[in-house]
Structure formats: structure tokens, C-alpha cells
Image (tube, coloured by chain):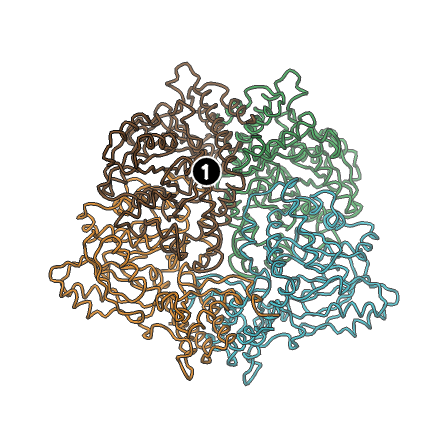
Chain colours: A green, B cyan, C orange, D brown
């Protein structure tokens, strides 16, 4: 009998960098009748989400909830702060920074990208120079992706703020925390972020469909200066609703609100500091395994993390190289034989090129723990062996050793 | 012991005009792990939705799915066909026509409203005159709400098309079927509708959060003429995606797609003609009861349907008058004592006025049948008696008589 | 188009006398992973059920939980108190009393039935005479069905106890409250009941599969006198477990325990007195409708309640006569056309006889409220009209009038 | 920060030897309204279970379904074949064989145990000698536990049959497959098993609460010879029902039936041979890891499988030794730190003894696959390191190597 499909019965494990694994209490909370959207429980439940969302983002200012995915939140953030002809600076460490920039362009905004490739963090010196050169303050905002899901680079948002301030530049700092919120430490107010966008299907552990834009007074002033903002994206009424329906610019995303309530209860029940520490601890175990796998005679033939410097690695997603077409073969083997789904590579090679099959990604965000990570890593080790892909020894033991440590 | 709350244990019944009652198979289908969004089951499932959605709308052309509520679909429809400075004509029979117009204005579109009040259908003669007067064809589109959820007026969309054609006017006909699709007969292609917007939480019986814009070649040409469309609202890639994520301009609304699959199976399993006939039959039972309740010495003191002419009444929502503050008292009594939630009045009186408490609405859309309607009407009769509100006799019997008839 | 199946889309309504409608919170609570059965949450949750079950039964003594249906609880009660050759007296008002007696016979117990037919309560004078005649105290127990689900007769358990006491007879009083617990008032200790059996799928609103035997010290002494009790039925360890598994004589019914927790929260949250009052109020509305329907020239041709005296009627189930084969026709019509399922008749006519089609039953137990009852009655009125079954006017209005009253 | 509880957020993983992990489709199927129990879908669904259950057991004869746990099925099997005073022979390889014997004793059956300890399979020579010595055929049945969940010994049921036949002995062969059905190969008819008992919460992947007794014509004849069988346990009507309720001797376990339908679809969809091969493959991976962990200087200080001979090991449960109190410490650490719950030891040491803390068990039955097993083993390796428990190297790599192999 072939091994194919033999071992795939059992729980599916979706280890892609979003959507993440949905906790049972979230799904339970969403399996319910439609509530009244004019009075009653849903209204107070929704009110209760606001402070918990702000605490998650580390802000005391405003949050607007959108029925949309993260791309919608991108557009919302841009629509409330910029108008056609305005200019933004986009330091980029991966595909999603470029994507946000493209969205801005489609709105008629002039975009200047500082592209640092797919394996390096922002070069803040270059950013500082560019800002210093912008004497006329034509740049209205700097768009920074905190963790780029494609490259798994984690950028230093507070340092970017420091450069803007050092340059005495009035540009807004707008952050994309779609892949980091609830995973990597993020402190909006403390770090001086003016606008932050995120979505619910990663660290927030809720089925995709709702996104968020957080903003502070600076951003609110920018909004006030605009002559026209699309009604759907306008964050004003959403963030300070007089009537319940204004939270959502129309009908509420009823079931998602119940799911979010359950997810926020899980996060704040565990404690945000602990949530961050858990993600870090689990990521370190993954890195230890990857380091060990890479210890082979010719490292070019084996598995390699995209980001060399641990200080620049996301705690929620890890992009990996494996010589094409082994990355794709490994993904397929794991899905068919172990019920384990890894993420495809994104942005590290052109979609139709042979090299595209030389990358993949691991999602380790949200509802994850030690046995899951060991199952993920143990699955990969199994696949490496099944496909005769060179790999160094002791990877799983190394990961276990990390997980065994107190901190 | 007080009757208060005594009888409210038991199933809650949400009889508001959306969100509607969610069928158990839809909720079951949504209670599942997040699927892979890059390959596998979700992709073919999503593909399978498209022809079934088109069949529901009566079109062979295009559909774009949006993660948004109906207001988002409004904005999407406008964004793909019009640009700032363009003009639209809006014949209005209720609050939602005005709402769509306001959304257009916020996009910089010039709006001309023909307001026929809240209890009358469009006066097509006036519409025809206005179009005839527009020699320069400044009017780029006519926005028509098929069933206005606030007034429960159902307008004649095919007749509107006939007037536009008779005037030889090139304006697009754009229809809002949020409250009618899957309830009242609607045939997009046969009726000559160019753009149609709807959402999932009414006749489509799925938790709020996804909406749809259907469009034909005329509308696609209008889109092609635009120099700039926001990336999120642009329907081009959504309707003809090369990659799966383009369906949704980013992350898919994973769980909603499973829910929609189940909902469309229910609708097409029953048969669309039968679904329409069921809604009609149930509506007629409601009307029979309302007619009977209204047979009192001074009809001004009793319950009265907002729309006098049955031919103009929605089959999915019924707006009613009851002298203030009795409408509000009735709603409260039913919710507290019978577990039955009716809809508030919308748009028939200013929100803060005493008259606001003189209106309410019944939702009878989607997952409804005979015992539910008799429970709804029986509840109202109970409330009328409990609150000593004058009402004619025989209402429930009259409704039962209607339901007992074959057709 | 035929009315057939046209109106059946929408929520199904199962109005049979058990299983009853399951509340959403109960189903939500059961949709979860299997818990550990050796430590943790399940153990404390199970402990928490015991006082709430006792409060529901009105006893401060013992309860044993069985994974079984109500028939299993019958056998458990018998197995712990009687041995082959013992004699029991069974006053009967319906099929279920006979069924319990047959179960006793199958265990080798001698059974004496006092059969009062299917439309009358116990004649306590006859019971008293029989007990008085039993000078030798050969009768070890009196088995009394509180509410017989087949006839919908509700017997007076406290009065039966009084007769046993008056006769100075030591027989145990054993009550079947399967159809009454959580619906009709029942007070085990106050009424002097020694053993009570019930199950979870009626007033307890939980999917069928768990049953209960409550017992007091008298019954425990009877158990202690037995030389042999089957291990599965033995209530000793179940009622006073040293280890968690002893609660269930093996593996716990894990998911049912979560369901029961949710159901007991609903009951005690509403308040037991109020639960009883609600059932009474709803039953009175049903009776008012039935009385009105029966007001026809020749009452033999119409609908008639099985139990004439309201004081003897269950508040949870109503057995009805309708000339054969109209009862069956009515049930079929309602299921196919309105999505409403009524209960078949049981025990009022032989299963294969033409008369069998002259009876049906309504369940109105557990998770029911005013709009549901009006939907049930409205459905029946619709069916009566559709099938041209003679019925008096004003039934629904009469029911609404009852529900409108405070008490 | 302490490691304690840090890594336990994320999916809980219950790796005890039953209840096992419930597949999502089973839970989905059970989250539904109560169905009618007198007509309709539930009746045909239940009929459909019978052939699939028989195929699972490898029999063409009879199956009776019980609302009970496995202990109830034990009692049912005994009750239908034996009467007080009859004698049974019980070769024992663990606690559950003793438990079944005790249940027989409580029914008045004379029990003779051949106890082979907790780490050895049946000595069939001794069994053969005992049967040969029973010239009078006083032994009416041999009770054999196929896989004893406490010891994880798997016995050779076909060989036991061969001995009975070789002895020309008419005793019934009764098998307990509670821990093996749907996991280890079992072929009732081919192996000559007369009665087989099992339950739904292990290989059948359904919440605990339903059990099964399969029997053949020999067993049916034994039943026919009995003068009295308790009504609840009597398998006659259950296996050959004239009316639907007879399947269950009363009210059906409605929701479990939907769950079973989904579970049987999963099993037969995968294919029974493949299900068995999957369990074997996964078990071999576990054994490889355990072997490696045990390679230490003083094996007495480390982890050791209870069953030395792989041919005698269950494919569904593995009992392990780890010097007290390390076994208990390991279980606690894994639950608190990784969200991974292992099974307690059972029957290998007295419950209150210090030695009790020197045993634990792994469940790997039903809904399990490769990534889950690697997560289980990876978790254990983590715990061994965290607690400084001596263990040999390369365990996880060895397990991965096994899983990587085709067969």
C-alpha cells in the first residue's frame, strides 16, 4: 500500500500564515441565531469590544471596525488621510508593502517606494535621508508594514517613528499590523503610530471578514482636512457612532462580533504580555529546528530561513527556502500524507517561475501551542525524510529543548 | 405573578426585515476549521457559487462578491460606473433610496432625487418626463430600490426600464435588491437591469458580512471608461479572477462561503419559482390578518399597513402604522413576553419624534414558513389584546384561511 | 401550483411530546472537543449538576445518572428496589404505566395493574382499598406515572402518597416523571415520593441519551436489602461515587454533561416556579383553542381533548381525538405544508386499527413560549381549514386572549 | 516568567485512550434540532447504520445498539447469553478483563479467571488445558478482551477460537473490542467470534453514550434458551425491530445517530483496510520513539513500553512505565505547558500506591494522523527535557523515519 493519503485522516492542521486556527469557543460563539441589530445584547457586546480592541493595539484613541478583509482596511486607512495627488513614502521589506503602495496608487496617491528587498529590514538611514530631503513636506505619510507576511521580516516601528521625529517631519506614520497584532509586541501610542490597520483572521483567531483601523488625533485631524471621503470608508461615524449601525456603516457583521468577543476573551484572559511571550517562545523553537535542518554539507541544498537575523524575524510567520521544486513537493507531501498544510511562498519569486517552487511559509499565529508546533516540525522532518531532502540531525530535539526551557 | 418575561423562554424569533432567520444547515456549514485559501476545496466551492448566484439574480453576465454589508455594495456599484461630477437620478419610495443617493453624493456624484414619499411607488410618468428633458444625457444612471425595506414598497423595475428605453436615454439602470432578492421575483437580464446590488443576510439567509454586485456588459463598458476605480471596489478582477484571491481583493471570507453554499443549496433545492411563490403566499396571509385587524370603528386608532395597494407591497417586509406610542409598546411587550422581536419603523417618522413610536415592521424573508407566520401573527394578536389596542376580529382565522389555500 | 411542500421551507417545528425543542445554548455547549474524563473541568462540572438536579426534583436525597433512555431508568429503579417474585401495584392512566409494568414483569416481578383506562386519572379509592386488603404487605412498591405521555393525564402523586400512608402500608412510592419534570409542578420530598425516574429529552431540553433515578433513604434501604443488583443499574456508587467514573458506571456521557449544564442553567435562571407557571399558561392557551375548535354542531366530528377535566391535564403534552383518519391526515398535511410535526397518538387505539388514525398529540414542553404556541395552534387551524375538518370559530383569538393575561 | 501555562493556549490535544478526538464532521452532524422519532429521515438514517456497523465488525449477523457506555454493553452481552449460576472462563491480560468478569459476578455468574498479568498476552496452552478439563461443559462462555485498554496488550482472538474448537468445547466466544474496533484488525465472522461488544467513543470517534453488541446465530440460540432477560438489555427486538423504537428499547439517541452516520462515512470513506494500516503505521512510529527514549545507561530510570513484544501491542493505545512519580509529573507538565493531555495508568499499580505515579498511557485511536502523532511525541520529548528525565536521543527522528516510509 502506498503511504499516500494513508496518514491524512485525523485533524487537518492549517499552518499557513493566515487564516489561522480558529479556537473552538470562537466557532461556538458564532453558531447562534441572528440577533436583533437595533436593540439588546448585540449592542452592549459591541460596545464591550472597543476597549478590548484598543488594549490589544496599545492605544487610547480610536478604532473603526470594517466589514472587509485587510485590503479593505488598507484602503480605509488611505481614504481617511490622503487625497489624490498626495504623496506617501513606503519603505518595503516584502510583497505586502508593495501591495499597500499599489492600493494607494489606485486611489491616485503618488507613491515612492524604498525597496529593501525580501530578506532585509528597513534601512532607516535611507528613510531618514529621504525624509530630510523632503523639505517641502510633500510626503504626507509613511506606510510601514510591521511584519511582512511574505518575507516574515519584522521591522522596527518605534525606530521608524524616531527617524520621522528626528527629521522634524510631519508625515503620518501608518502601520500595517495584519500579521503581527496579537502575536508580536506592538504598542501603538508608545511607539507613536498614527494609524494602524489589522484584520481578524490571524492573531485575532476569528474567521476572515472583519478588519480594523486604529487612529489617533493626528490622523483624525488629517481626516478633518479632507473635503471628501467615501461613505463606506469614512471612519468618523464608525469610531464615534451616535447610532449602533454607524459602527459598521450599515448592517452589523452580527456573527463575527460574537466571535470577536470570544477571541478577545481568550487573548485578554491569557494576558497580552503572555500571548507575546508564547509566540516568541514557539518561534524560537521553530528557528532552532530550522537551524539544525540547515546544518548540512552544502547548505544551498537544504532548508534555510529567509531572514538571517533572529531580531528581524516575525514571531508569527516564517518564510523558508528549499531548492525548487522541493518546497512545493514538501507541501504537497505533507498535505496528502499527514493532513498538514503549509503556506505557499509569496513574493520571493515570480508566481510562474520555476523558482516559485523553492519557497514556503509556516504560520504560527494565534491559537497555537507547544504540541502543535512539535507536530508542525515533526511533520516537516517526516516530509524531508520521505522526499530524501538533505537535512541536518537533531532538529526536533533542538526545538523540544527550547520549548522545555522556562524563561 | 406578572406575565412579564414569563412566556419569553423558548426559541427567540427574530422577525425583523433582516438579518433574517439563519437555517441550521447554514450555521452547521460555517462551524468548521479555517480552510486553505490557496488550494483545495474552498476554491472549487467558490467557483460553484458563481453560477448559482447568477441564477438567483436572473443574469448570465457578471457577479462580484464583496466582503462588506449592503452599504458597501452600494458604494461598489457607484464606484465602478460613475465618477465625481456625474449625475444620477433617484426615484425614491423610502429611506433606503435616499441612503443610496447620499452615498453617491459622498463620492462627489451629483444626485437628483424624485421623492414619491414613503407610501407610494415610483410615478413613472414623472421619471419619463425627467429623462425626456435630459436631452444632453447628463444623467448617467438611474438608481432604483426594488423593495425599500423602510416603506415596504415594491417598485416595478421592468417598467422603469421601459421608460428609460422609451426615452431613448442611455442611462444605466442600477437596482438595489437587498430586501427582495430570493423573496420577490426579480429577473435581471429579462428586465434590463444593468447593475444590481444585494447582500447575504436577508433572502440569502446567511449571517451578515458579504454582499454582491451583479452587472452586465453595459456596466462593464462604463467601468472601462473610468480612469480610476478604488482597488477594493473595482469589480473587474473580482468578476473575472485569474487568481483565487482576486475574487475577494485579498483574503476570502472563508466561513461565509461555506454558509452561502448551504444557503444556495436550500434555495435552488426548493426551486426559485417556489421560493417566490412561498413568499407571496405567506405575505398574503399577513395582509389578510392586517386587513382584519384594521376593521374597527375608527381605523386611525388601529393597525394599518403602510402600503395600501397589494400590488405594490413587498413579499418580504411589511411596514405598519399603529398610533404612537402603541407601536413601540407592542414591540416591547412581544419581546419581553413572547420572545418575538419585530422590526422598528424606519424613515416613516423622524427618529426622535413622538411619531417614531407609531411604526413598526415585520420581516418575512428567507427561512420562513407557515407555522412561523402564524406564530408571528398570533403573537401580534396576543400583544394587541394584552395592551388593549383596538383590533378587528378574525385576523388569525383569515390568515389561516389564506395559508390553507392551494394556488 | 400545489400548496404541497410550498410552505415547508423555514424552520422545522417539532411539536411532539419528546424529544422537545433543544435550546441553542445546549447545542452550542455540546459542540466541543471531548474532555479529559480523569481530571479537570468535566469533574467539577459534573459535581455541579447534582445539586441542580436535586433542586429540579425537589429532593435533598440522592440522584443516580444513567446513560440510557427513560426505559433504562425504569429498569434501574426496579432493579435497585425489587427482586424476582416481589409484587408491585400499578395504577394506570395510559400506555406508559403499562409499559413500566411490563418492564417489571420481564424482571420477574409480579405485577398487579389497576387500569383506569386512557382518559381518567387514578381512582384513589380503589387504590386505597387494594392496599388495605394487602394485610401481608406483599406489595413492595406502587408504581405511579405522574403524567402519562400517551393519554396526557396528570395524576395526583401527593394524594397517592396520602392513601399509602393512610393504609399504613410500607410500599415504596415510585414515580415516573419523564413527561412532567421541569414542566408540571413536582416536589419529591414534600410529596413523599421514594423513587423518581426521569430523562433528559423533554423538560430537560437535552438530546435524548441520559436518564435519572432519584431516591430517598427508604429506597436506599430497600436497595441494601437486595442480595444482587446488576452492576450497570446499581445506583449505590452512582449516587455516592468515590471516583468520577462511578457516576456513570464507566465512561462518562461527556457531551451530554455539557448540554445538561446549559439546560439546568436555563431552568434555574428562569426559576423553577416560573418554568411551571409558563407551562401552565401555555397549556391553558392550547386548551382554550381546543375548546373553541370543538364548538360544532356534532362534536363527534371535530377535535376533542382526551382529558375532559382541566385539573387532570398535563401542562406539557395534550392528547387529542379527531375522527379517523383525519388525525393522521392533519399531521401529514401540517408536516408537508407548514414544516410542523405533531405527535402520533399512542395507546388510545391499537396501532394497526383504523381508529389509530383518530388520535394525535401536541408536545409543549421545555423550550417553548408564546409565539411558538401560537404558531402551533395557527398551524392546526390552517390544517383544519385546508382539510375541511369541522371546527368552531375563534380558537386562535381565544388562545391569544389567554396568553395576553397576566396571572 | 514561568513556563507554566505559557504554551498551553492553542488547541487542546486529548491523547488519552478514549474518549478520542471527535472529527469536526461528527460534531457538525450532531449540532441540529431534535428530529421526529416516529417517521422521516431519522428512521432511514438509522437503518443505514446497520450494514455499515456490521461491515465494521466483519459480521453478517446481528447488531444491537444500546444507549449506554461500554460497561452497559458488557452487561448486555452477558444478560443475553448467561443466567445466574452459569460459568464463564476469563483469560485476562489487564484490568478490563477483570472488570468484565466482575460485572458477570454481579449478575450471579460464576467466574473463573486465568490471569496472565498486565504485560503478557493469553497463554493459550493454559486456556486449552482448562477447556479440555471441562468435560461437563460447565463453561458456557469464554470472555476475551481483544485489546485491554489498561495494559495495551492485544490478544489473538482467532487463536483463542481455534483452541475452543480444538477442544471440541461448545462455549461461546465473547469478545470485548471497545478499544480495538476501527483501530486494530478484527473480523468477527472469520475469526469465529459469537458475541462482540464495543462502544462509540474510541475508534468510532463519536461522543461517549452509545454502545453495541454484535452476535451470531449461536449467541441468538443461547438467548433463546434463557427464560428471562431484562427488557432493556434484551437484544432480540433491538437487532430485529418491528418498530423503530425497538432499536433502542424506547427513545432513540437522536443526535448520536447523526454523529455515528458521519463517523461511519469517514471510516468507510477511508476504507477499513486503510484505517487499520494507518493505525499500525502510527503505532510503529510511537514504538520507534519509545525504543529510542529507552536507550539509556540504566533503562530502569527511563521510559519503557509495558508490552515488550510488538506483535502483542495494540495499535490504538500504548501503556508506558516511567519511574514514579515521574509519569504523573510528566502528564501534569504536558497538560499545563503544552495543552497535551495523556492518559493515566490503569491497573498496573494500585490507585493509592506511590507506584501508581509510575505509569501512563497514550491514546492513538480514531481521528489521528501523522502530524498529531509527531505533536504527541514531540510534546513528550519536551516534557522529558523539561523535567530532566533521562531519555535516549533520536526518538523523534526515528518516529519521523517510520512515518516517512511507504509500506
Furthest residue to the right? B136
Image position of B5 with respect to B29: above or below: below
The percent position of residue D52, horizontal first and vertical second, equals: 47, 45
Left of A376 or right of it: where is C57? left
Left of D165 or right of it: where is D227? left
Quarter of the picture containing the N terminus of chain C is: bottom right
Quarter of the picture containing the C terminus of chain C is: bottom left
Instruction: Locate residue C71: give its quadrant.
Output: bottom left
Q: Residue under circle 1?
A: D182
User: What residue is at 58 percent from the left and 66 percent from the top?
Assistant: C6
Name the foreground residue: C140 vs A276.
Answer: C140
Chain ID of residue with mark 1: D
The percent position of residue D221, horizontal first and vertical second, equals: 32, 45
Note whether residue D152 is visible.
no
Q: How many labels does the image show?
A: 1
The percent position of residue A305, horizontal first and vertical second, equals: 64, 26
Name the foreground residue: D315 vs C369.
Answer: D315
Note whether residue A259 is visible.
yes
Q: What kind of element bears circle 1?
A: loop
- Local packing at callout 1 (Cα closer than 10 Å; few below 14, some 14-19, many 20+) is many
Furthest residue to the top? D297
Furthest residue to the left? C135
User: What residue is at 65 percent from the left and 40 percent from the top?
Assistant: B39
Image position of A136 with respect to C85: above or below: above
Name the foreground residue: B107 vs A125.
Answer: B107
Instruction: Locate residue C313: give its quadrant.
Output: bottom left
The percent position of residue C82, horizontal first and vertical second, equals: 21, 52
Furthest residue to the bottom? B297
Left of A336 or right of it: where is C58? left
Amino acid at each position: 500500500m502506498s503511504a499516500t493519503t494513508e496518514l491524512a485522516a485525523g485533524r487537518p492542521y492549517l499552518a499557513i500564515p493566515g487564516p489561522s486556527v480558529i479556537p473552538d469557543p470562537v466557532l461556538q460563539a458564532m453558531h447562534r441565531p441572528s440577533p436583533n441589530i437595533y436593540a439588546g445584547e448585540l449592542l452592549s457586546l459591541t460596545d464591550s469590544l472597543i476597549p478590548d480592541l484598543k488594549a490589544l493595539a496599545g492605544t487610547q484613541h480610536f478604532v473603526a471596525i470594517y466589514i472587509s478583509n485587510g485590503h479593505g482596511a488598507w484602503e480605509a486607512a488611505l481614504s481617511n488621510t490622503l487625497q489624490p495627488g498626495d504623496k506617501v513614502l513606503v519603505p518595503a521589506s516584502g510583497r505586502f508593502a508593495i501591495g499597500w503602495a499599489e492600493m494607494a496608487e489606485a486611489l491616485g496617491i503618488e507613491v515612492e517606494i524604498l525597496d529593501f528587498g525580501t530578506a532585509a529590514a528597513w534601512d532607516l538611514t535611507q528613510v531618514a535621508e529621504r525624509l530630510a530631503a523632503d523639505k517641502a513636506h510633500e510626503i504626507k505619510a509613511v506606510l510601514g508594514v510591521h511584519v511582512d507576511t511574505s518575507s516574515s521580516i519584522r521591522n522596527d516601528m518605534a525606530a521608524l517613528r524616531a527617524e520621522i521625529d528626528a527629521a522634524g517631519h510631519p508625515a503620518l506614520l501608518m502601520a500595517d499590523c495584519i500579521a503581527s497584532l496579537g502575536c508580536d509586541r506592538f504598542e501603538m501610542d508608545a511607539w507613536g503610530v498614527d494609524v494602524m490597520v489589522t484584520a481578524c483572521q490571524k492573531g485575532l483567531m476569528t474567521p476572515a471578514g472583519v478588519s480594523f483601523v486604529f487612529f489617533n488625533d493626528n490622523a483624525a485631524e488629517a481626516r478633518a482636512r479632507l473635503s471628501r471621503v467615501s461613505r463606506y470608508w469614512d471612519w468618523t461615524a464608525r469610531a464615534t457612532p451616535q447610532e449602533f449601525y454607524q459602527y459598521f456603516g450599515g448592517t452589523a457583521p452580527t456573527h463575527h462580533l460574537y466571535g470577536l468577543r470570544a477571541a478577545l476573551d481568550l487573548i485578554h484572559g491569557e494576558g497580552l504580555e503572555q500571548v507575546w511571550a508564547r509566540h516568541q517562545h514557539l518561534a524560537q523553537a521553530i528557528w532552532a529546528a530550522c537551524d539544525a535542518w540547515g546544518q548540512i554539507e552544502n547548505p544551498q541544498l537544504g532548508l534555510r530561513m529567509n531572514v538571517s537575523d533572529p531580531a528581524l524575524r516575525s514571531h508569527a510567520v516564517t518564510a523558508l527556502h528549499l531548492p525548487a521544486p522541493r518546497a512545493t513537493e514538501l507541501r504537497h507531501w505533507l498535505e496528502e500524507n499527514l493532513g498538514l498544510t503549509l503556506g505557499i511562498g509569496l513574493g520571493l519569486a515570480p508566481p510562474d517561475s520555476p523558482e516559485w517552487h523553492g519557497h514556503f511559509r509556516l504560520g504560527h499565529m494565534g491559537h497555537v501551542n507547544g504540541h502543535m508546533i512539535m507536530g508542525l516540525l515533526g511533520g516537516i522532518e517526516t516530509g524531508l525524510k520521505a522526499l530524501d531532502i538533505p537535512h541536518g540531525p537533531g532538529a526536533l530535539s533542538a526545538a523540544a529543548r527550547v520549548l522545555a526551557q522556562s524563561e
